[in-house]
Amino acid sequence: MEGVMARVVRPELYEARKGEILEAARRLVTLTKGYDGMAVQDILDELQISKGAFYHYFDSKQALLEALIDRLAAEAVPMLEEIVNDPDLPALAKLHSFFEKTARWKTDRKDYLMSLLDVWYADENAVVREKMRVAAPERYGPLLSRVVRQGIAEGVLTAPQPDQAGGIILGMLIDLGYSFAVCLRQVSSDPEAFERASRTVAAYTDAIERVLGAPAGSLTIIDSETTHAWFDPVLAPPQPPSA
């Protein structure tokens, strides 16, 4: 229409404001509300913005959840790229570092991840989970495949299809993460959940070594210390109040 100028939104400002909303949601989820307990209004109050401003960036609370998970996944990429790009590390050392640092990175964010656990695996978020399942191999798979090709060149791996191996391993890691989460959700009522999680980790580790053609026992996907770090706080009996 003549005389009406279209609103121009600078991409960097759009992303900055979107990031502020995500960071506010992350604080609320981790420190006070949990995801289920957090309402959109809590974010509006935290940032002093209008409901219209929120829905300009996210059309639903489910879209916010998807963005929170995607942002979390993207945060790990630079750390993993640094490992893969290290010219001095042999392939098996890179794989060890890849898995060890990924596990530590998640453990460092345990409170946040635990606050998202139940809602992430709720039936109504199955579509979002599937989107992330597809996106993860695309994001991380090429990094792992580079390490696989290096390992083949070094003679320590024998994967026949190195370009596909990274994506396959990522799919297996996602399945392992799901099984691990199921055990975490059951541990308060099932004393066998910890041992079942440990056996599941061992089984997936063996399977990943076979996909890679790596020597048996050469890889550690999740070590015992990390497994305890996730399960022990849930298993510990409540402490009586101090006098």
Image (cartoon, rainbow, N blue to C red):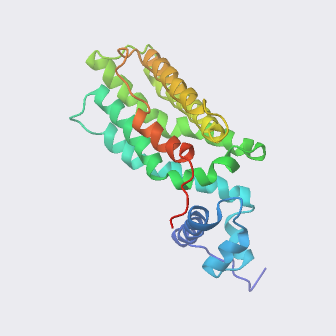
Q: Is residue 188 visible?
A: yes
**Looking at the image, which is closer to me, 242 or 87?**
242
- How many labels, in total? 0
Work out which residue is located at the far left of the displayed protein and give it: 88
Q: Is residue 223 visible?
A: no
Coordinates of residue 53 in the picture (x, y in percent): 69, 75
- Can you say whether 105 is above or below 225 in the image? below
Q: Quadrant of residue 101?
A: top left
- Can you say whether 38 is above or below 237 in the image? below
**Looking at the image, which is closer to me, 180 or 24?**
180
Which residue is pictured at 63% across the width and 52% down the height? 116
- Can you say whether 84 is above or below 241 in the image? above
Coordinates of residue 127 in the picture (x, y in percent): 73, 42
Coordinates of residue 134 in the picture (x, y in percent): 62, 37
Which residue is pictured at 71% across the width and 63% down the height? 37
Q: Where, quadrant-wise, is the N terminus in this rendering?
A: bottom right
Work out which residue is located at the far bottom of the displayed protein and give it: 3
